[in-house]
Image (cartoon, rainbow, N blue to C red):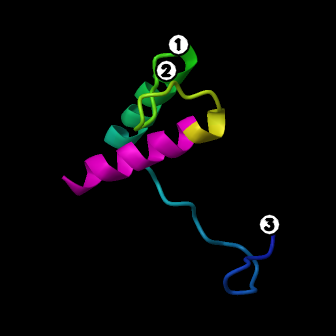
Amino acid sequence: MGMCTACSEESLHARPKRKPAAKAKVAKVMDEFASGDLKSSSGEPVKRKDQAIAIALSEARRSKKK
């Protein structure tokens, strides 16, 4: 494995697991992006995949707090 940048040791850190509800939310948002239905907060259609991913993760995090 690679070196951990946070602790400078051999990387044995596990990635955080996503909850099924968060996975479903991300999948739903990415489907909206693929079909061209995803809109930003200003109402403009989202054109870049990285912007769609940011929106998906933000919505998943927001739904986790409720």
Range drawn in magenta: 52-66
Looking at the rendered structure, the kind of residue marked 2 is Asp
Q: Which residue is mark 2?
A: 31
Judged by depth in the image, the label closer to the viewer, 1 or 3, is 1
Earlier sequence position, callout 1 versus callout 3: 3
Q: Which residue is mark 1?
A: 35
Residue at x 81%, y 69% (from the top left corner): 2
| 63 magenta-colored | yes
Give residue 37's position: percent from left, percent from top: 46, 17
Give residue 61's position: percent from left, percent from top: 36, 52
Residue 58 appears left or right of 4: left
Question: Hey, which residue is sitting farthest left in the picture?
Answer: 66
Position of residue 49 relative to residue 14, above or below, is: above
Q: Decide: few, some or many residues near mark 2? Use Cα within 10 Å; few <14, some 14-19, many ≥20.
A: some
Residue 1, disc = 3
Q: Decide: few, some or many residues near mark 1? Use Cα within 10 Å; few <14, some 14-19, many ≥20.
A: few
Looking at the rendered structure, the kind of residue marked 1 is Ser
Position of residue 44 relative to residue 16, above or below, is: above
Residue at x 58%, y 65% (from the top left corner): 14
Chief secondary structure of the magenta portion: helix
CB atoms of marks 1 and 3 within 8 Å: no
Please tell me whether mark 1 sits on a helix, a strand or a loop.
helix
CA separation in Å, label 1 and label 3? 38 Å
For residue 13, which quarter of the picture? bottom right
Give residue 39's position: percent from left, percent from top: 45, 27
Give residue 15's position: percent from left, percent from top: 56, 60
CA separation in Å, label 2 and label 1? 6 Å
